[in-house]
Image: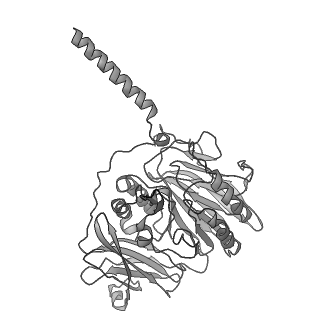
Amino acid sequence: MKKKKCSSKILIVIKLFILVVSLFVQPDYYAQKPGRTNAMITLTNNGAPENIILTWKGDPATTQAVTWRTDESITEGYAEIAIADAAPTFTQFAVKLDALTEKLETVNGIKYYHSVNFNDLNSNTLYAYRVGIEGHWSEWFHFRTSTNENKPFSFIYFGDAQNNVLSLWARAIRSAYSEVPKAKFMIHAGDLINRPNDNEWREWFEAGDWIHAMIPSIPTPGNHEYAKLSSGDRELSKHWRAQFSLPENGVSGLEESVYFTDYEDLRIISLNSNEKQEEQVFWMEKILKSNPNKWVVITYHHPLYSSGNGRDNKKLRELWKPIFDKYQVDIALQGHDHTYARGRNLASGINVKDGIGGTMYVVSVSGPKMYQIHEERWMDRAAENTQLFQVINIDNDTLNYKAITVTGQIYDEFNLIKQVGKANILVDKIPFGLRERDFNSKD
């Protein structure tokens, strides 16, 4: 009897210990922890090109950059390009270009990254290209250069992918492509992966697969693109500059993470919210002051107005928001908080309710890691536990924005209407009767 009583007491103590621990050890900000991915990736392609991605280093009307990589058996690369034609004989007119190649040591062995910047292209023209080397060519892909006529166009914006990228983020980028297959580019607002190692980058490329090779990407780095060094400092993933060929028109020391690209009548500015925040202020003001375009989109990772509890970025807001206000930035596309939120704030921090006001701030998440919404509501529309992508269309004086769930439901929508010398008019188009989603919502 004594032995049984003793065992019962031990069990009670163990249960109490587990209960106490569970009260204090919580996932970060009540983060949902999806199951481990069971998706598989190939770590070697036996010399074949992989991780093919389009970006821009120059004018989207006359240039196009492409980057890819190979295993250690292929140490050089080439790209071939021709004006696309319905007849397969277009290939006989292809021009062959040498790639710039750099070597990178990874956990999966030595990889060679190759990049080509196609120059002197015709505007509004469909091109076909392939990359590789004799015996190891990729398939032929298409891309279209931008027009100089300021015609209507759409682009896609993704918040954090970060976790279980191949298993669960893949449906976000693939659903977005299904929604707008002729999107002109994709903005990624940081935390594309969780840890900046080769396996996770490989998942990100596999999730988008050939979409990356057809629609150019405009990425900005998040905190999870930064690796921790033995000194305790953090530095941008060594993969970043190797795998993305981006403009080098930004702040010295932040090349290819702080930059701008002009697409027709839109200036897209990438800021790096992870480091040297003060040094970006003067550069940003210069780029906005000299901006000849009608619309301005700025993307960076850490929100000026947070949508998650305990995640206020006061210093960043005090540094950057006065510049946003001064130059009437139209929309800020952010990540980091693993929720959805959008709204506009005046300098006083009061939410604009009269349909006229300042920059529209958006926080979104495209991957499966989820947090809870901030209790203090600055936003007009919010969501928890929801994977989304955003489609933005620009047509002369109107910017139309849609936030769409990965299951195809329009969750949020608005128009911004440009007025000369005045603030934008906001036309709110939140779907009538569609309540805000939380952790208990079901489609």
Q: Nearer the viewer, residue 260 or 405?
A: 260
Q: Nearer the viewer, residue 390 or 257?
A: 257
Residue found at the far top of this picture: 1
Q: Position of residue 175 (x, y in %)?
A: 43, 58
Q: Position of residue 8 (x, y in %)?
A: 28, 15
Q: Nearer the viewer, residue 436 or 292?
A: 292
Residue lying at 41% horizontally and 30% vertically, measured from the top left: 21
Q: Position of residue 305 (x, y in %)?
A: 63, 51
In the displayed structure, 184 sits above or below 39; it is below
Residue found at the far right of this picture: 421
In the displayed structure, 247 sits above or below 270; it is below
Q: Give the quarter of the image for residue 271.
A: bottom right
Quadrant of the rendering where the N terminus is positioned = top left
Residue lying at 23% horizontally and 13% vertically, measured from the top left: 4
User: Disc count in the image?
Assistant: 0
Residue found at the far front of this picture: 231
Colour convention: one colour
Q: Nearer the viewer, residue 196 or 121?
A: 196
In the displayed structure, 81 sits above or below 18; it is below
Observer able to see residue 396: no
Q: Position of residue 258 (x, y in %)?
A: 56, 69
Observer able to see residue 304: yes
Q: Report whether 177 appears left or right of 166.
A: right
In the displayed structure, 341 sits above or below 127; it is above
